[in-house]
Structure formats: C-alpha cells, structure tokens
Amino acid sequence: MIRLFEQHFVREQKELDGMWSYVREDGAEYTLPVPGCIEQHPELLTYRGKGTYYKKVFIKEKTNVRLEFKGVSHTADVYFDNEFLVHHYNAFTGFSGIVEGVEPGEHEIKVCVDNSFSEASALHVPNDYYTYGGIMRPVVMEQIGNVYIKNVHFTPDKSEGIWNGKIEVEVENVSDKDIPVEVRIELARTEMTEMFHAGARSCGQVTFQVKCENAEEWNTDSPRLYLLHTNLLLDGKIVDDYIDRVGFRTISMTKQRLLINGKPVFLKGFNRHEDYGTIGSAIPLQVMVQDMDLMQETGANAVRTCHYPNDERFLDLCDERGMMVWEENHARGLSLEQMCNPNFDRQCRDCIDEMISQHYNHPAIVIWGILNECDSTSETGREKYKNQYEQIKRLDSSRPTTSATCKHFQDICLDLLDIVSFNMYSGWYQDVPVKDRHEQEMDWIAQTGGAGKPVIVSEFGAAAMYGYRDRGRCKWSEERQADIIRENLEVYREDERITGVFIWQFADCKVTEEEWFFSRARCHNNKGVVDEYRRPKEAFDVVKQLFPQMNGKEK
C-alpha cells in the first residue's frame, strides 16, 4: 500500500511490492521482500555495504514509465534495462525517474544500494538509531503520457470567516514538442479550470485561488479531510489525474502559544523512530496503526518524527486521527567537524526540498524541524542553521520552524527559529531536581534569542529494560523510568510558559555499535515507554494518567 487512499483513477499504477532478487557485493545471492530491510535475513543481520536488487516487470504497450521509490537506504542508483535512470541519497525521502518510449514486453529494474558509512554520507553516520539497508518503503511503477501532473500543493487560509486555498499544480512535459493542455481542479464542491501551455522538456506551474464557503476545518478533535482532484485534459479528454487529501486549517503563534485555527493547542506527544523488533525500519501499516492506537490511548495528540521524514502512510494516519506532527530533516547530534563534511550542505538541502515538496499537503504537520542536537554554538554552525531555516521559509511560510537543542547556556541560534525547543534529561543523565533544572533553562531562554517565543520540551525521559522490576527503583528498572517521567510531567503540567512536551521516546529502538553507542544496553536506546515489540512498560500507564491532566493548558 502506497497511501491510505487512491491517488489515481486515470493514470495506470502498479505497486512493485513482493520478492526481489538481491546480490551482495561479494556475489552472495538472496531473495528479499520489498519493502523490507536486508537485516531481516539471517545471513545479513549485521551487513553494512553494497548490494543490488533485481526485478522483472512486464509492459503491455509502448509508453513512458515512471518509477517512484518511497525510500531506499541510504544511497540508490537505479537502472532500467541496464540504462542508468536516477541517483538518490537519503533513506527517508522519495525519488523518481522516467523512462521514455518503453516498448512492450519484459524489462528489468536494477537498484544498486549502499548503507555503508563514509565521507560520501554526511547524514547517515554511526548514531543513536540504526541505519538499516535496502528498499525499505514501497515502490510503484506508473505509465504516463508526454505531459503529466508532477505535483500539487495546497495552502489554506481563512478570510472574513470563509476558507480559501491556493492550489499550485506542477505540470511536466517530457517530449520535444510544446503541448497545450487544460488543468482542472475540484475541491469541496468547487471546480475551476485553466489552459496551460506546456513547453517542450520543461516543467511549469498553474495556480488556482479557490473559495470554499462550506468547507469544514481540520482540527485535532474533528480532523475533516477533503480529496483534491486534479485532472489534465488534452483535446477535451482526461489524460492524467492526481488526487491528494488536504485539510483546511491555519497555524499561527502568539506569545508562548501555538495556535491551530486561531485556538491555542498544547502538544502532548512522543518522539517516535521507525523501528520495530526484527523488521527494522520497513514498518508495515499494521504496526503504524498499532503505534497510533497506543499513543492515543495515553492521550497524546502529537508526534515528532525523530530524526528524519516519515513514511507517508504514517502521516496519512496522523491526518485521519488529528495527531499533530513535528517533522524534521535528517540530522542528529552532528559535530561541527561532521557539519563541515563537503556533502553536508547539499544533502541537507536536498532532504529539506524533498521533505517539504512531498509532505506539504499533510494538515497534521504543524512544525518543520531541523538539525537535532547539532552544533549550534559556533559561528559556522549558526550559518548552517540560518541557511536551512531560510530555505524552509522559501518553500513554506505557513508553518513555524524549530530545532531541538541540548547546548544548554551555549546555543547561539535561538533567535533564528520560531519555536524554542530543548532536550533535557534531568533525573537520568543529570541527578538534579527536575523543577530546579527546568527553571534554570527557562531563565536562560528568556535572556537570549528565545525571549517571548513559544517553548517546547522536545525530549525528556529515562531508560528501562522491559520486565526488569526492582523495589529499590534502581536505574534501568521500570519503576525508576516511571518515576522520572512522572516528575517531569508534573513540573511541565504547572508551567504556563511552555506549549508542548515530547517524551523520549515511544518505543525502544536499535542503535549502531560504532563509537560510544555500543554502551547502550542491548545495543538499543531503551527509553521507550513500550519496548521494540510494543509491550508497554510501567511508564506507559504513568503517561496515560498524566497526559489527560494537561488538557487545561490548551485554554
């Protein structure tokens, strides 16, 4: 399943899920599932390196073929009948390539993948989460004409009590001839049409301004969604279509508060990695739904996609359930030296471009984040933060920006962002009272570039081994974890200066063994309130008790 709704009624589309051939760099051959991580095969449990996937496909009639990959870790080179098609870096954003004039018959797709660590990869490095390998998200094969709808963006706003929207339709012409087409949109019982001259070998945009007087708003209690239909007509006949799901909602800020549709919200959420037991980061829909059910059972209304863009199917679930999302680009804990990798700026820029372009229409996404716990203390680091915030604002000025910092009393970037967010592990890494340490942090924020801005506690928590109980409440016990999370939540519940909290983390996840991460027990980050198989720990019930008590902070 690619999305939780049909995206095309006209364009022919085929999912390529199933068993693919895989040949490791040393020649060893396997048959692996797609989507899937190579690590789920018993002979590839710890393999890090190169390999090649192969898949035969059949084409009925001559056509242009568009291949779309939702996520390949972490580097991919795609070939069609041994002809190079497209190169892509980053496991967590999608990419595509078009093969023109494909003849009927059998053809072969070849995908060369690499999940190794080297200077060529500035973002996938040894880290506090595991870099799995393989084609970990869905693959789709489409048949398109010479002119097709490449993308559609929807930006809602409200004026004089009436919902309006800007719809930007991106149309691409892959042929050598200019082609006049008609672009038609339908949204919330509103229809509009425009003629468009698609220039040869070019990509252009058609913009609609629509008024939807009867549209209902999307909010966390009533997440109303609408299908946005876009059709492309040639000589009066529909030749292509594109369907996306959108919501009418606005995001704004006042002092110390985030507003959805002009009403204050308090974010009660979890940091969530895409990682599950024996299947790694290739999360199936069933597990996504289970995660959502468990988070909402606690009373959570928000989730942070640490530390990379998430699978669109999970974002679709968030849209449907009214779960607010902080989505961020791919970077975690990078030092200044790592941020000076010659590939860093380009790979971050590409990730942000793709994240926002591909996920723009999700009403659940209310915050864009960048560079979790990276170097924000140097002038060089500050310049990189500044460039990324400016890039986001050029692409999307409708959502606020933030970055989770751990550079307490040293961060020099708080003036660059819209919302101040900090990671604090009082009671776990620092044996200090939560309230005292929190007050120090809030005072420092008020005296720096964060004065007057909304504040989010973006990470807090403690580790526990599932099933390990101790009446003395020692470290690593479920009791100690529950105590620390309780103390944190009770402090934040009483502080009117903050607008959200995100517990670290929802579920235990695997980490790499390189560098200091090997010191994590079981080579896992064990701070989940559920373990890697989603078995709740004692802390889960503490959150379930306290999250509902924080509802009053939204008023």
Image: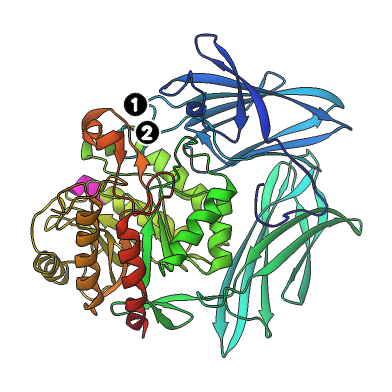
The amino acid type found where label 2 is placed reads Asn
User: Residue at left 13%, top 55%?
Assistant: 410
Q: Residue 343 carries which label?
A: 2
Position of residue 337 measured from the top left corner of the image (x, y, whole percent): 22, 35
Of mark 2 and mark 1, the one earlier in the sequence is 1
The residue depicted at 48 percent of the width and 39 percent of the height is 281
Report helix, strand or loop for mark 1: loop
- Whether residue 447 is visible to the viewer of this picture, yes or no, is no
Quick check: marks 2 and 1 in contact, CB under 8 Å?
Answer: yes
124 left or right of 16? Answer: left
Towards the viewer: 338 or 70: 70
Quarter occupied by residue 519: top left
The amino acid sitting under disc 1 is: Glu
Distance between mark 2 and mark 1 Cα atoms? 8 Å
Q: Which image quarter: residue 262?
A: bottom left
Which residue reaches farthest front?
471
| Residue 12 x, y percent position in the rendering | 81, 45
Q: Give the range drawn in magenta.
A: 378-382
- Relative image position of residue 88 (x, y in whole percent): 53, 33
Depth check: 278 or 398 in front?
A: 278
Q: Which residue is drawn at 91% across and 59% down?
A: 236
Q: How crowded is mark 2: few (under 14 residues within 10 Å), some or many (20 or more)?
A: some
Badge 1 density bin: few <14, some 14–19, many ≥20, Cα 10 Å: some
The chief SS type of the magenta part is helix
**As displayed, is residue 31 above or below residue 240?**
above
Q: Which mark, by number, is residue 119?
A: 1
Q: Residue 58 carries which label?
A: none
Q: Which residue appears at 43% of the width and 21% of the height?
A: 47
- Can you tell which quarter of the image residue 390 is in? bottom left
